[in-house]
Image (tube, rainbow, N blue to C red):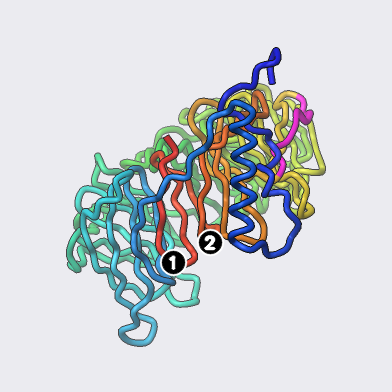
């Protein structure tokens, strides 16, 4: 309430009334009655009633898997075993937000699928071979069962303009032709080194970074494999085993007693050194205005990406991400009724507030984000737009019969239902 006027469309950031019920199974009719009372309270207060629109339903079965990419939803059927671990999987391609079926593609794999990409009439599927930990990728002509090529390698990314697929093996990173699978270029991985992708723009990296224990540092063009810049660093045993961190447009490397050095990509221009204690830590890309490093158990350190100066340190948080001008952080240990999302000041790490039991789904692109709130003991959830600047929640609607597997993409809330079907609610 501001100056005695209720801001329309806003609800308290704690849950609507029924979300605060005890952890017991609430009868469906009683639950809906509670929801009606909550909505009546909103009407009495002068706020518009959030509608409960009917979703678009896409038929699916138990074992089916959904992959989202841009304005496409790719629904992969459950395993239909042919021989041993080999199975034939059907991939249905739907356009979003209309959920109109565009094509049906059949792909044969010998393990669990973890990624599906559709580019220019070619579907590239990544899967793990049996339980061996070996990755493979297969390319199939969309709408058919015609295999274009198959490679034993990890799928990294696909560039549509170049008709190029990036693949990774234990020995190299490969650039292969999307249509034929022919190798266009190969970047060998040094025996004492590591190759990482960074500077992602959409679904493709801007650079490849190579670093070795002996001090070889290189930046490469991921479209051609060509060398862009090189630099020699002090030798550091074990550095390539997790002690090199590409973060957006810079790369940080462990330089021993000198701490970590940062170099600007792609020219590898030296930027700064930091003596912040980053031992037993891992680096996170996309942390808003900061470089966020996290210890393996819990705790984080915030680094200024312009100077390398340690801004603040906390022992509480296990993950953080930038949304607008703020950080959203989660704690490593959380009680059932404790908040899940804390809003932090990036410069100081000070807590500005929290969003109760609301959970993050996806950013809206304007400093806010979509979130969901599960109603305990039911298959009901609320979805809303949450604003870190004002700590407000704008309720958009309520979804029923949801099995708690939800994503927000292409202006839709996309959830699996208790009957295994896929439901799509419009977010805007």
**x then y, percent, for residue 1:** 69, 21
Q: Residue furthest bottom?
A: 84
Q: Residue 24 or 304: which is nearer the viewer?
A: 24
Q: Which residue is mark 1?
A: 420
Image point (57%, 30%), residue name: 263
Residue at 44% from the left image edge and 39% from the top image edge: 427
Asked which quadrant contains residue 38, the reply is: top right
Is the C terminus in the top left, top right, bottom left or bottom right quadrant?
top left
Residue under numbered circle 2: 403
Q: Quadrant of residue 136?
A: bottom left
Q: Secondary structure at mark 1?
A: loop
Q: Residue at x 48, y 40 (%)?
A: 51
Q: Which residue is drawn at the image coordinates 40% and 33% (left, top)?
A: 228
Residue 71 as seen in the image, left or right of residue 6 = left
Q: Nearer the viewer, residue 375 or 347?
A: 375
Of the pair 87 and 293, the residue shown nearer to us: 87
Are circles 2 and 1 on residues that touch, CB within 8 Å?
yes
């Amino acid at each position: 309430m501001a100056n005695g006027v209720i801001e329309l469309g806003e609800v308290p950031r704690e849950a609507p009334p029924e979300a605060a019920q005890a952890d017991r199974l609430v009868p469906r009719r009683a639950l809906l009655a509670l929801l009606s009372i909550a909505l009546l309270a909103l009407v009495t207060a002068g706020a518009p009633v959030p509608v409960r629109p009917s979703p678009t339903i896409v038929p699916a079965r138990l074992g089916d898997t959904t992959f989202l990419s841009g304005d496409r939803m790719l629904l992969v059927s459950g395993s239909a075993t042919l021989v041993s671990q080999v199975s034939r999987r059907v991939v249905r391609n739907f356009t979003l937000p209309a959920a109109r079926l565009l094509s049906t593609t059949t792909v044969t794999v010998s393990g669990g699928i973890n990624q599906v990409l559709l580019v220019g009439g070619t579907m590239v599927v990544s899967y793990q071979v049996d339980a061996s930990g070996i990755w493979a990728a297969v390319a199939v002509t969309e709408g058919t069962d015609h295999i274009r090529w198959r490679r034993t390698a990890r799928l990294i990314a696909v560039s549509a303009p170049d008709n190029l697929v990036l693949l990774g093996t234990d020995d190299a990173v490969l650039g292969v032709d999307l249509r034929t699978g022919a190798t266009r270029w190969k970047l060998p991985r040094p025996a004492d080194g590591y190759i990482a992708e960074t500077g992602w723009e959409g679904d493709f990296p801007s650079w490849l970074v190579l670093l070795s224990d002996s001090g070889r540092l290189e930046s490469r063009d991921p479209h051609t494999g060509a060398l862009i810049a090189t630099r020699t660093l002090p030798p550091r045993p074990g550095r390539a085993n997790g002690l090199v961190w590409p973060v957006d447009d810079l790369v940080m490397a462990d330089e021993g007693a000198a701490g970590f050095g940062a170099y600007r990509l792609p020219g590898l221009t030296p930027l700064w050194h930091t003596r912040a204690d980053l031992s037993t830590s891992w680096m996170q890309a996309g942390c808003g205005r900061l470089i966020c490093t996290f210890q393996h158990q819990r705790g984080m350190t915030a680094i200024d990406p312009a100077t390398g100066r340690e801004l603040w340190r906390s022992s509480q948080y296990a993950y953080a991400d930038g949304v607008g001008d703020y950080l959203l952080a989660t704690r490593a240990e959380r009680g059932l009724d404790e908040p899940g999302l804390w809003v932090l000041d990036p410069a100081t790490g000070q807590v500005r507030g929290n969003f109760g039991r609301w959970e993050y789904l996806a950013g809206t692109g304007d400093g806010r984000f979509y979130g969901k709130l599960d109603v305990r003991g039911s298959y009901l959830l609320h979805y809303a737009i949450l604003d870190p600047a004002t700590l407000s929640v704008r309720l958009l609607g309520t979804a029923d019969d949801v099995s708690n597997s939800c994503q927000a993409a292409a202006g839709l809330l996309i959830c699996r239902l208790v009957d295994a079907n896929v439901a799509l609610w419009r977010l805007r």
